[in-house]
Amino acid sequence: MTVKAGPQGAVRPHQGRIPDFFVVGHGKSGTTALWDMLRQHPQLYLPYNKEPWFLADEMRPLSALRPQGTGSTPRTVEEYLALFADATHDQRAGEASSLYLWSRTAAGRIAEMQPGARIVAVLREPASFLRSLHMQFVQVYVEPEKDLRRAIALEDERRQGRHLPKDPYWPDATLYSEHVGYVEQLRRYRERFSEDQMLVLIYDDFRRDNEATVRKVWRFLEVDDTHPVVLREANPTVRVRSRRLYSMVHTLAAGDAAVPRAVQAAAKTLAPRRLSRESAMAIRDRVVYGDPRPPDEGLMLELRRRFKDEVVALSEYLDRDMVKLWGYDRRG
């Protein structure tokens, strides 16, 4: 098949298996669990690298800086298509980069590569989405500010290049309000794909009935929807107890040869023998991460008031009462 190399390379033919469908996001909205359950189906092929990011041009310059454990970004079209090389002729191939819905370029790049693609998006109530997203960003070094209220208050200054994270990995991610342009994000895809090519899921429905949602996606992808579903919960929201401790364990888990002596001494306290990557990851899960603290209800109310107009617009766009579903009719 012929694919375009995109704005960073000349247009030329490429041979390889082109994906048939894309789970485009949002993150922290069940996309990892959905990807995991879709991979169970014998008629579907999703590579182990869940989020290649390749078709979001904004992320390409950051690919070499991706945090440990978040996958890798192919450098060329050939490397990208190689992710799907093991898909058989009777399987539908796909990927699940949760940044594609946020990206302003991914919809166009997907349409160039695969005009007949099926698109799956998952949306979550804005305040809970941003709270969970913020905790994820703290976890993976995107956001140094552990307090969500203060992080959101820094948006305007960060747009002007001030108060950015030290050694920023992805500073644009910390403009939290830009993640909640749901209608604009969906329209970018609707401009390029027909209504029949798009499936918009709501996180609440997925949480309430995983199996029914997965079968709905299978029907949308035109594969056997009677196949058994093994329910999974993946990528749960967690709280980083200590960034200093997180940094230490992250360094050990990554297998960094240049581990400072202080870190080595602390590691011996945690584990007297040589710490393997698996052991470091286990320590991380037990010691570094904790259950999320209760949300700041005052801040949650402020966010819901702030994004009510977006929820009203989404209700009109989807022809579904999201205002009532998400409780925005009781928010004033």
Image (spheres, rainbow, N blue to C red):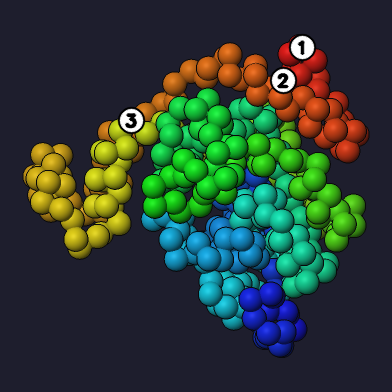
Residue under pointer 3: 241
Name the quarter where the C terminus is drawn: top right
Callout 1: SS: loop
Q: Residue at x 67, y 42 (%)?
A: 178
Identified by mark 1, the residue type is Gly
Q: Earlier in the sequence, mark 1 or mark 3?
A: 3
Tag 2 near tag 1, CB within 8 Å: yes
Looking at this view, is 228 or 167 the one in front? 167
Please tell me whether residue 69 is drawn above or below residue 17 in the rendered image. above
Image coords of residue 157 (percent x, y): 55, 39
Question: Can residue 228 be seen by looking at this rendering?
Answer: no
The mark lying in front, picked from 3 and 2, is: 2
Q: Label 2 is placed on what type of residue?
A: Arg
Give the Cα distance between marks 2 and 1. 7 Å
The numbered dot on residue 332 is 1
- x, y percent for residue 320: 87, 30
Q: What residue is disc 2 on?
A: 305
Residue drawn at the location 44% of the way across and 51% of the way down: 168
Q: Mark 3 belongs to which amino acid? A: Arg
